[in-house]
Image (cartoon, coloured by chain):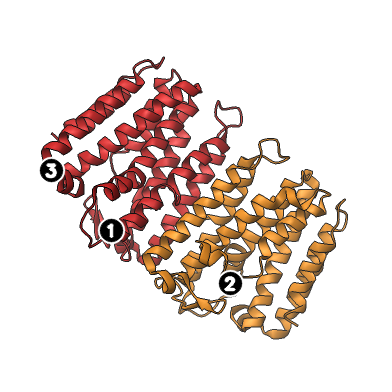
Chain colours: A red, B orange
């Protein structure tokens, strides 16, 4: 568990969670525990994705993957335990917090479950070896990656005591930026989105999504600079 | 997910959860959603346990295991999704219930995580191919099986609004009966506990544990007949 969590990474999801909390005018600290829970949940998805029966990857961030280092059974269990620990940490959110532990757990479970990340992974598996199809690719992106990014942003807002209108703005930011991050990743790795839509259209689409994301949060009462910078960065690294 | 959950089984954990709720004087219904959450979490442990990198079992309850039926990747994801769904269901426990959704999630996460069921599985893997050792076997039993049974009983009590003293009684019942169930299983399958302690001592120990379990709940205010019958049945089937 520790090996994979400490293997590095951009920490994009917890950073988005803290930034969303600040954007509604609260201290970032209020979103720290949920942000950590999202990151270890994300780590579990990477460990299980790397397993031989899934992508069978030997390296992740330049280091041996969990199952290469510790064996397949231990990697399976490390992933299971990180998923479980994410919900344990959420359950420890202070009862007096603006958003209840249950509300946060519901957000995370729905984003991570069979209608979210796992649904995207199932569709990704089903698509293997078949010609890529734009509608299916959109489904996979929205579920496999964007669902958790959207949840990270929403959970940060909830931790900051977001009003329903503010939460709605953050949801639009999360959806647009989540898709933009995924397209940028595809551009960097020259994978599926680029294969379907071509490089120029992919870049243009990412640009539109980032502008949409930033426009959504314009009127939030707190510091929106971190959320804006995160969205802009996602495109600039791919252009 | 549906295939493995509907494959049958004793439904011991949800039955214990409902019985514990009744034992503190509440209607069993109050524990229904948490009872279901515990059962699907239990199902995930079976699906992952059966995978080739773990016990590599082809049959479970007379039917092909999940990975034999649907492939290894789908079985892995079905297990992940059931674990996630368990916490989604717990998060949906009514805010006005005697026990908060967060309190129930904390119980389940601690019982299921690296200090509970998964800790037991890791130790079980580590013990493979080595001479069985009584202390290690006790650790495995307490974590791999008894932790979740204990949590089922405690969660049922929490759903029924148990006082701290009542919860303490249920905890003692859960610990003793959880170990008794495991020893009875070992007797029926002629596995590890019997190999270490012999058949007669195993039976005697199970009998002592069941009496301890029943003594613990004697003074609870509700109907304790179901909990008593469940504990007695565990031993009678193994004698």
Mark sitting on residue A127: 1
Which residue is at 32% across, 25% downward? A227
* Label 1 secondary element: helix
Q: Residues within 10 Å of mark 2 (few under 14, many from 20)?
A: some
Q: Are marks 1 and 3 on the same chain?
A: yes
Q: Are marks 1 and 3 in contact (CB under 8 Å)?
A: no
Q: Are marks 3 and 2 in contact (CB under 8 Å)?
A: no
In the displayed structure, A71 sits above or below A120; it is below
Q: Are marks 3 and 2 on the same chain?
A: no
As measured in the structure, the alpha-carbon distance from the residue carrying label 1 to the one carrying label 2 is 44 Å
As measured in the structure, the alpha-carbon distance from the residue carrying label 1 to the one carrying label 3 is 19 Å
- In the drawing, does residue B105 fall left or right of residue A229? right
In the displayed structure, B77 sits above or below B67; it is above
Report which residue position mark 2 lands on: B137
| Residue B11 % position (x, y) | 66, 65
| Residue A230 % position (x, y) | 28, 28
Report which residue position mark 3 lands on: A198
Q: Residues within 10 Å of mark 1 (few under 14, many from 20)?
A: some
- In the drawing, does residue A162 fall left or right of residue A132? right
Q: Earlier in the sequence, mark 1 or mark 3?
A: 1
Mark 3 or 2: the one toward you: 3
Q: Considering the image in quadrants, where does the C terminus of chain B appear?
A: bottom right
- In the drawing, does residue B46 fall left or right of residue A153? right
**Residue A80 lies in quadrant:** bottom left
Chain letter for the residue marked with disc 2 in the picture: B
Whether residue B120 is visible to the viewer of this picture, yes or no, is no
């Amino acid at each position: 568990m520790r090996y994979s969590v400490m293997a590095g990474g951009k920490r994009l999801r917890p950073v988005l969670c803290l930034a969303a909390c600040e954007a509604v005018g609260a201290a970032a600290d209020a979103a720290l525990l949920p942000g950590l829970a999202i990151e270890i949940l994300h780590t579990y998805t990477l460990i299980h994705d790397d397993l031989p029966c899934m992508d069978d990857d030997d390296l992740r961030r330049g280091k041996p993957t969990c199952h290469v280092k510790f064996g397949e059974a231990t990697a399976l269990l490390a992933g299971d335990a990180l998923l479980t620990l994410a919900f344990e940490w959420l359950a420890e959110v202070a009862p007096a917090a603006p958003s209840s532990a249950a509300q946060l757990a519901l957000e995370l479970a729905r984003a991570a479950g069979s209608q979210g990340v796992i649904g995207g992974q199932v569709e990704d598996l089903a698509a293997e070896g078949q010609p890529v199809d734009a509608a299916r690719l959109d489904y996979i992106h929205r579920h496999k990656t964007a669902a958790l990014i959207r949840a990270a942003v929403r959970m940060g807002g909830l931790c900051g005591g977001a009003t329903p209108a503010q939460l709605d703005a953050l949801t639009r930011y999360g959806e647009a930026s989540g898709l933009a991050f995924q397209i940028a990743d595809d551009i960097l790795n020259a994978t599926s989105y680029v294969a379907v839509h071509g490089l120029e259209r992919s870049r243009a689409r990412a640009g539109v999504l980032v502008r949409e994301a930033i426009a959504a949060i314009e009127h939030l009462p707190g510091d929106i600079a971190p959320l804006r910078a995160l969205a802009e960065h996602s495109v600039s690294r791919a252009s």
